[in-house]
Image (cartoon, rainbow, N blue to C red):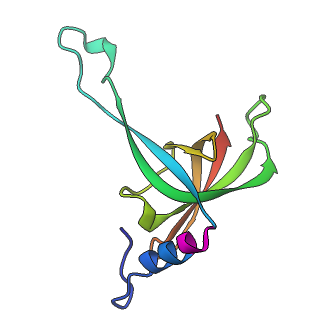
Amino acid sequence: MGNKLFGVDIAKIVNNSITSAGGVLDGTLTKATSGTRTPGSLTAGTNPTDATYAFKGFTETAGERRPSSTSASSISTVSILGDSCTVVPEVNDEVTIDGTDWTLLELVSRDPAQALYVFKAEER
């Protein structure tokens, strides 16, 4: 899925190397896709549907709390190996990794080869 740089699929190399070293976890990325409006009920919304995609990744606890939040949910980072997922992860996607559910809040970094996506994420 990554961009080839200088003819080399760096994302694939990174994905294969980290995966073979055993340093990643299985995860599920959930994207909400807009549906169509219900005929005769235009105010009922667009009936979104969820699509799920498998990926490899890991989390790191950052120990901070969302400034506007009064709940005790924590903000951490979720890292997704770009070549392990068939879609590009985006803000507001939902992720389950190591039994914990997260909402992706902010893209912190993504390298030019799309080998690794790092997001700030809030536990749901």
**In x, y percent, where is residue 3?**
37, 76
User: Quick one: quadrant of the N terminus?
Assistant: bottom left
Vertical side of 111 occupied by 6: above or below = below
Q: Nearer the viewer, residue 95 or 93?
A: 95
**In x, y percent, where is residue 60?**
72, 57
Count of marks placed on residues: 0
Residue ranking furthest to the bottom: 6
Region of the chain picked out in magenta, as a range: 18-22
Q: Is residue 68 left or right of residue 116?
A: right
Vertical side of 4 occupied by 32: above or below = above
Q: Is residue 116 left or right of residue 98?
A: left
Q: Nearer the viewer, residue 73 or 83?
A: 83
**In x, y percent, where is residue 104?**
57, 46
Residue ranking furthest to the top: 40
Q: Quadrant of residue 30?
A: top left
Residue ranking furthest to the left: 39
* Residue depicted at 25% across the width and 14% down the height: 42
Q: Is residue 74 left or right of residue 102?
A: right
**In x, y percent, where is residue 68?**
73, 35
Q: Is residue 76 left or right of residue 51?
A: right
* Residue depicted at 75% across the width and 35% down the height: 73
Question: Is residue 114 highlighted in magenta?
Answer: no
Vertical side of 98 occupied by 10: above or below = below
* Residue depicted at 44% across the width and 63% down the height: 84
Q: Main SS type for the magenta part?
A: helix
Vertical side of 12 occupied by 124: above or below = above
User: Quick one: quadrant of the C terminus?
Assistant: top right
